[in-house]
Image: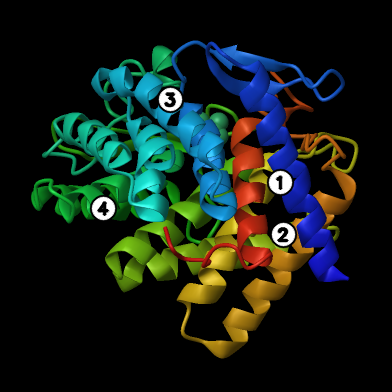
């Protein structure tokens, strides 16, 4: 039964990759209208462009069909100019957009592009603070200052760990570890919940405040902050084997499991007083499904392996059964509720993480390969 569900979900998302690849020629799929299936595109990939390539790399890996590899490479080339963008989200862009091509297919051009993104991003490290700040061109940077950090940048640091071992500078690994380590202090609260963002003094690195761009309040828990923290630390542990990152991922995962709605699909902010009459966020939920599968493979403790695997399966099942339609459109992602942007939509990163999780659940991908 479960196998049929995973296979159905995988086939639906693969069909969505086909439809998107055939129809989108310019700009990267960013968020979709769940009724028409039409994508709003970002001309140069915003912070999300790599997730589309990532879906193509996964499809190329699991089907061995040349057209997916061709699309992934074409879109990786389109991302290459972003190596010079002043944004911390070069991590997301070049990890999913290019590194996956090397890890999954040994693609030499993908490797060059991933290294170019890593090299340029590494040059922006703030030595004093021990972090990569958001950067002037980052998604959230327009309304804040120079010393800004966000939990959604931890996962991308793994690009530098990979790059340090694949032709880059060995110092990049240390930068990545420092970046991730400092975000525990900046964003992870004492109870394991996560605050999206923090400001720091860019000359001393001292934290000056915690706040949120997309959550309901600075002291609330925005679902995607929690989700980005779980996957960020799981991925950083996978690449570094630094135990503190496994601990951070598990701490945040336990908080999620203790607070998520009974049907496993998160509301957009855990502290919205209107719950249950408010928006869900299937993208945060999909990130966590993929991350729990990684944690189940990474933890050495048997009871946790079981707990994470069962929770991952229940989470993925809720998404496949209730939110993934026959076209492969994953509805009810909530991009930015504060400004009313795409609050019940298909979001490219949500689709990516559900596709990744379904690759694992159908046995097409090892859970902690990247
Ligand atoms: N900036 C990442 C997010 O909106 O989840």
Residue identifier under label 2 = 259
Do tag 2 and tag 1 residues touch (Cβ < 8 Å)? yes
Residue occupying image coordinates x 17% and y 56%: 165
Q: Residue 24 in the image: state x and y as whole percent.
A: 62, 17
Q: Quadrant of residue 284 in the image? A: top right
Which one is closest to the eye, mark 3 or mark 2? 3
Q: Is residue 191 visible?
A: no
Which one is closest to the eye, mark 4 or mark 1? 4
**Circle on res. 74:** 3
Q: Residue 32 in the image: state x and y as whole percent.
A: 72, 22
Measured in 3D between alpha carbons, the distance from the residue under mark 4 to the one under mark 1, in whole angstroms, is 34 Å
Do tag 3 and tag 2 residues touch (Cβ < 8 Å)? no
Which one is closest to the eye, mark 4 or mark 2? 4
Residue occupying image coordinates x 65% and y 14%: 40
**Circle on res. 270:** 1
Measured in 3D between alpha carbons, the distance from the residue under mark 4 to the one under mark 3, in whole angstroms, is 22 Å
Measured in 3D between alpha carbons, the distance from the residue under mark 2 to the one under mark 1, in whole angstroms, is 8 Å
Q: Earlier in the sequence, mark 2 or mark 1?
A: 2
Do tag 4 and tag 3 residues touch (Cβ < 8 Å)? no
Q: Quadrant of residue 193 in the image? A: bottom right
Q: Earlier in the sequence, mark 1 or mark 3?
A: 3
Quarter of the figure that contains the C terminus: bottom left
Q: Is residue 180 visible?
A: yes
- Residue at the extreme front of the image, as rendered: 66
Do tag 4 and tag 1 residues touch (Cβ < 8 Å)? no
Residue identifier under label 4 = 162
Q: Is residue 42 above or below residue 66?
A: above
Q: Residue 36 in the image: state x and y as whole percent.
A: 84, 18
Q: Earlier in the sequence, mark 4 or mark 2?
A: 4
Q: Regarding mark 2 in the picture, which secondary structure is present there? A: helix
Residue occupying image coordinates x 51% and y 52%: 61
């Amino acid at each position: 039964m479960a196998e049929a569900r995973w296979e159905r979900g995988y086939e639906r998302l693969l069909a969505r990759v086909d439809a998107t690849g055939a129809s989108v020629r310019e700009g990267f799929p960013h968020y979709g209208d769940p009724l028409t299936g039409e994508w709003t595109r970002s001309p140069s990939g915003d912070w999300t462009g790599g997730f589309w390539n990532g879906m193509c790399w996964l499809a190329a890996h699991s089907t061995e069909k040349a057209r997916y590899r061709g699309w992934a490479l074409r879109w990786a080339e389109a991302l290459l100019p972003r190596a010079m963008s002043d944004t911390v989200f070069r991590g997301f862009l070049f990890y999913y957009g290019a590194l996956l091509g090397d890890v999954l297919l040994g693609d030499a051009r993908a490797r060059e592009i991933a290294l170019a993104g890593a090299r340029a991003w590494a040059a922006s490290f703030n030595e004093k603070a021990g972090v990569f700040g958001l950067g002037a061109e980052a998604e959230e940077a327009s309304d804040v200052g120079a010393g800004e950090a966000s939990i959604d940048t931890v996962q991308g640091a793994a690009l530098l760990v990979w790059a340090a071992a694949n032709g880059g500078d060995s110092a990049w690994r240390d930068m990545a570890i420092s970046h991730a380590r400092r975000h525990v202090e900046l964003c992870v609260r004492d109870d394991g919940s996560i605050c999206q963002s923090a400001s720091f003094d860019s000359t001393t690195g001292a934290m000056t405040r915690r706040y949120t761009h997309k959550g309901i309040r600075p002291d609330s828990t925005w679902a995607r902050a929690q989700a980005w923290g779980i996957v960020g630390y799981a991925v950083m542990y996978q690449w570094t084997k630094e135990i503190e990152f496994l601990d951070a991922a598990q701490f945040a995962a336990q908080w999620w499991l203790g607070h998520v709605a009974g049907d496993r699909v998160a509301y957009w902010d855990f502290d919205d007083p209107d719950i249950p009459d408010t928006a869900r966020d299937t993208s945060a939920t999909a990130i966590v499904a993929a991350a729990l599968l990684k944690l189940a493979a990474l933890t050495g403790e048997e009871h946790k392996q079981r707990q994470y695997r069962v929770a991952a399966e229940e989470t993925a099942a809720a998404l496949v059964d209730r939110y993934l339609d026959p076209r492969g459109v994953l509805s009810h992602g909530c991009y930015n509720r504060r400004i009313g942007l795409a609050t019940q939509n298909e979001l490219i990163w949500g689709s990516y993480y559900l596709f990744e999780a379904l690759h694992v659940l159908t046995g097409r991908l090892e859970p902690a390969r990247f």
